[in-house]
Image (spheres, grey):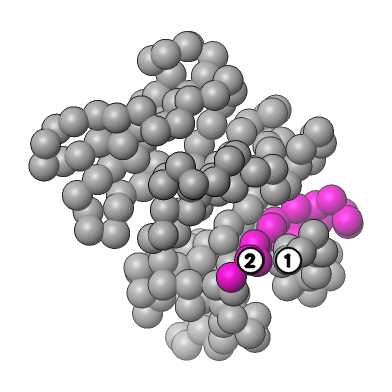
């Protein structure tokens, strides 16, 4: 069993479990007020929620290998079929999240270079968010309010991070940045402040 996310009102938890088939993970909704569990998604494979929106839109991730995954759009409302988005039929390393801009996605991948780089995907077209550099973007986060993007950089084993405006993708200065060898993003606030 693996926690995925909580609803905006904190009354409902979403989690995955392999209780139906040991080799597949289904998505469940658990109502904290009624203690009722409900199956909401079950297909063959190792599934998880990569990201979610308050509207019920989900980015579902299906693991296809140690670092490779396929990503799909799906709605908790049941008004959208499972729609392929990224990684179908590939063995590539991807991480995908909803962007702040409607119909746009943030994608972290090494697909077009020697290092993992952050891109935005809109209408089937990828455009770089981070500069091409000999430093790897190790991970990224976007706050729940979709105001800021935080990304970690691995520079020859030394970690640091940068912050971008989630709409314009312009760099935001991080005040009081520490002079340290290792600076990690531990967690971010819901409102991005």
The quadrant in which the N terminus is found is top left
Residue at position x 16%, y 41% in the image: 32
Looking at the picture, tell me which residue is in the foreground, 119 or 39.
39
Residue 18 visible somewhere in the drawing:
yes
* Rendering quarter of residue 101: bottom right
Calculate the distance from the C-alpha at mark 2 to the C-alpha at mark 1.
Answer: 6 Å
Residue 85 screen position, x and y as percent: 70, 48
Q: Mark 2 points at which residue?
A: 103
Q: Is residue 132 left or right of residue 85?
A: right
Q: Mark 1 points at which residue?
A: 122
Residue at position x 59%, y 70% in the image: 102
Residue 145 screen position, x and y as percent: 41, 72
Residue 115 is inside the magenta segment: yes
Residue 151 visible somewhere in the drawing:
no
Residue at position x 42%, y 53% in the image: 56
Q: In this view, does 96 lie to the left or right of 35?
A: right
Residue 10 screen position, x and y as percent: 22, 54
Looking at the picture, tell me which residue is in the foreground, 111 or 16.
16
Magenta stretch, residue numbers: 102-118
Crowding at mark 2 (Cα within 10 Å: few <14, some 14-19, many 20+): few
Residue 22 is inside the magenta segment: no
Crowding at mark 1 (Cα within 10 Å: few <14, some 14-19, many 20+): some
Residue at position x 36%, y 28% in the image: 39
Where disc 2 sits, the SS reads loop
């Amino acid at each position: 069993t693996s926690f995925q996310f909580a609803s905006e009102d904190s009354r409902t938890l979403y989690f995955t479990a392999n209780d139906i088939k040991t080799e597949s993970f289904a998505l469940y909704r658990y109502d904290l007020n009624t203690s009722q569990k409900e199956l909401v998604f079950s297909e063959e494979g190792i599934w998880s929620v990569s990201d979610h929106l308050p509207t019920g839109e989900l980015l579902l991730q299906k693991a296809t290998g140690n670092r490779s995954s396929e990503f799909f759009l799906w709605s908790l409302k049941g008004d959208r079929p499972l729609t392929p988005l990224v990684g179908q039929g590939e063995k590539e390393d991807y991480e995908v999240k909803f962007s702040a801009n409607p119909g746009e996605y943030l994608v972290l991948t090494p697909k077009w270079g020697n290092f993992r780089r952050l891109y935005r995907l809109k209408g089937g077209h990828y455009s770089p968010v981070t500069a091409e550099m000999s430093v790897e973007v190790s991970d990224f986060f976007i706050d729940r309010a979709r105001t800021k993007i935080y990304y970690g950089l691995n520079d020859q084993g030394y970690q640091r991070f940068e912050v971008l405006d989630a709409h314009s993708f312009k760099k935001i200065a991080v005040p009081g940045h520490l002079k340290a060898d290792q600076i990690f993003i531990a967690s971010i606030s819901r409102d991005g402040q």
